[in-house]
Image: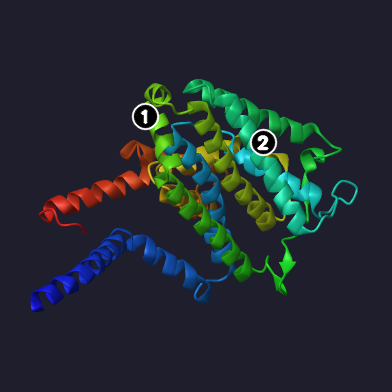
Amino acid sequence: MALEQTIETDSLTLPQAQQAGAVSRWVHRNAAILILAVLLLILPAVAGPFILDQIVGWTMILGMIALSLMFLCGYGGMVSLAQMTVAGVSGYMIAVFGPSSLPSISLFWPWWVAAPVAILIAVAFGTVVGALSARTEGIYTIMITLALATAFFYLTLQNWPIFNGFNGFTTIPAPHFLGVNWRAPIPFYYMVLFFAALSYAAVLYISRAPFGLALQGVRDNPRRMEAIGYNVTAHRVAAYAFAALIAAVGGILLVWQNNQISPYSVGVNAVINILVIAVVGGITHPIGAFIGAFIYVILHTFALDALVAVGLDGRRFQLLIGLGFVIIVLFSPDGIVGIWRRLRARARTSGGGNPL
């Protein structure tokens, strides 16, 4: 009888012990992400509006748009230069359907109607981009997406009845609901943090779901995946649609942050910036998009002041930004994420194989 009770007790506690061990390992592996999440949640208690809005907020918005590129490139093997264009489509649509400084163009729909419609149109555009480029690879995919991005730039630049030409739109307010002005520094920060965290979690989940695993198989060996019954083109188009959803939300947040949008918001420079952000941060993990965005924002914000402080022409700040990115890529082709992983591997080796 005692032996039977011992066996029954062990059978009950073993799954619990295994579950506790799995939770402990997950926390150990993701300790840095958990610490970062806590710091971001309490940041408004110690940081001012400039840090919340122009540094961290801008980082998370650009990180979301770069995350859509990271998903396509890192998990699907597709380099798209149209992700900033997708964000621009949603940004322009929120200006056209919602309120702005141009009552002759904008329809002044409420935000809860204008925002979903803008996202839907942007996702449809991203899906069309995917349908046009999914059957190509390498340089051909890059050229098709770049051509579409350039075409949209000139469309907004030269079209006045819908996009107001090179002037674009100004005074595009963020929503007011639940008695909160969501463009105020702290509410807007938490709104951006919510969508950035949601996008990050969604990419992690999709990458480990059957669709994400199949997409990675398509990336590694599309012919074999097609031979065993997977529709390679459909998986690639679906990946473009999912990435467009993330970029579309980021585009609306970017317009609400800047309170304006113009053709130069979606120009070639902006398109290339998203590519650079994703590559510098690292396309092997979703966190790389936000790391690259943070580096870009820091350099873009303080490079001008740094040049002036050392007596150089402040107009050369773009050169300083470019040099910073070149140095990072030269030392680590897989970006900051690659540097971190090599440091962890070296620490494990020197520590006798024990994880950090």
Residue 125 badge: 2
Q: Is residue 91 above or below residue 25?
A: above
Reading the image, the residue beneath label 1 is 220
Q: Is residue 153 above or below residue 24?
A: above
Q: Is residue 83 left or right of residue 95?
A: left
Whichever of callouts 1 and 2 sits on the residue coming sooner in the sequence is: 2
Residue 280 lies, in percent from the top left, at: 42, 42
Q: Is residue 122 left or right of residue 352?
A: right
Residue 68 lies, in percent from the top left, at: 52, 43
The residue positioned 72% from the left and 53% from the top of the image is: 115
**Pick the front one: 128 or 273:** 128
- Residue 316 can be seen in this image: no
Residue with the most extreme front position: 1
Q: Quadrant of the N terminus?
A: bottom left
Q: Amino acid at mark 1?
A: Asp
Residue 321 badge: none
| Image-quadrant location for residue 76 | top left
Q: Is residue 329 above or below residue 259?
A: above
Scheme of colours in the image:
rainbow
Residue 220 lies, in percent from the top left, at: 36, 29
The crowding category of the residue bearing disc 2, from other C-alpha atoms within 10 Å (few below 14, some 14 to 19, many at least 20), is many
Residue 351 lies, in percent from the top left, at: 12, 56
| Image-quadrant location for residue 15 | bottom left
Q: Amino acid at mark 2?
A: Phe
**Pick the front one: 159 or 68:** 68
The residues tagged by marks 1 and 2 sit, at their Cα atoms, a distance apart of 26 Å
The residue positioned 49% from the left and 75% from the top of the image is: 46
Q: Is residue 208 left or right of residue 45?
A: left
